[in-house]
Amino acid sequence: MDYSTRLGAVLRAFSNLFGAIATLFLLFLMFGITLDAIVRALYGHSIPGLFEMSELSLVVIVFLGLGWTQMEDAHIRVTLLHRKVPPRVAQWMDALAWLAAAVVLALLAYPATGEALESIQIREFRWGYVEVPIWWTKAIVAAGLWFGALQMLAQAGCALCRAAPVAAAAPALAPH
């Protein structure tokens, strides 16, 4: 994706913002679990609510990190067939794959949005050791899915609009 265009710059800005938030939640998860293990070893009990917040942190990390991973072109791909076809065919394969991914994410995002809106209206929470609001994580799931779909749709368009097809992808591992 060309991030020098206006759309690319907007996608990069949101990706960076979402990625930074996901990173903060990852730090919370790392330090929280470490602190919980220390407290459990010293005092024989866990920190109340940390387990519930850890679950919610995972949701934030995955769904806000989705766009950042896309921006960095870090999604896992199998390129066995891709390397065997002519560059123009590979270009169309890229576009169709990104379009299919965008459709799947949009199909997931649509009901997730309805669930998020309902959850926000009723201020949904979850009972565990402590009462934890979950409406905000449902909103993050929906936003992350829509943003991922938008990014993958833009990636499909960029794959089709490239002037010259890119050469076959280099293998990630050295050949034996």
Image (tube, rainbow, N blue to C red):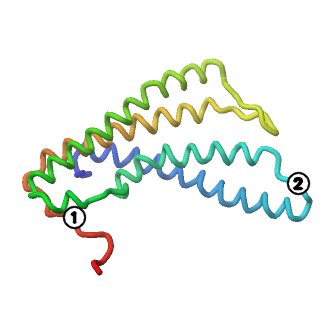
Pinpoint residue 34: horizontal percent, then vertical percent. 73, 62
Q: Residues within 10 Å of mark 2 (few under 14, many from 20)?
A: few
Residue pictured at 35% horizontal, 49% vertical: 12
Q: Determine the residue positioned at 37% across, 58% down.
A: 74
Image quarter of residue 40: bottom right
Return the residue at label 1.
169
The image shows residue 70 at horizontal and vertical percentages of: 36, 51
The tag on residue 67 is none
The amino acid beneath tag 2 is His
Q: Residue furthest bottom?
A: 176
**At x 43% / y 47%, what residue is drawn?**
66
* The C terminus, quarter of image: bottom left
Quadrant in the picture for residue 120? top right
Amino acid type indicated by mark 1: Ala
Find numbered disc 2 in the image and state the secondary structure of the residue it sits on: loop
Sequence-wise, the earlier of marks 1 and 2 is 2
**Residue visible at 35% across and 52% down in the picture:** 71
With 82 as the anchor, is 68 left or right in this view?
right
Q: Which residue position holds label 2? A: 45
Helix, strand, or loop for circle 1?
loop
Q: Position of residue 6 (x, y in %)?
A: 24, 43
Q: Quadrant of residue 55?
A: top right
> For this rendering, which residue is in front, 71 or 37?
37
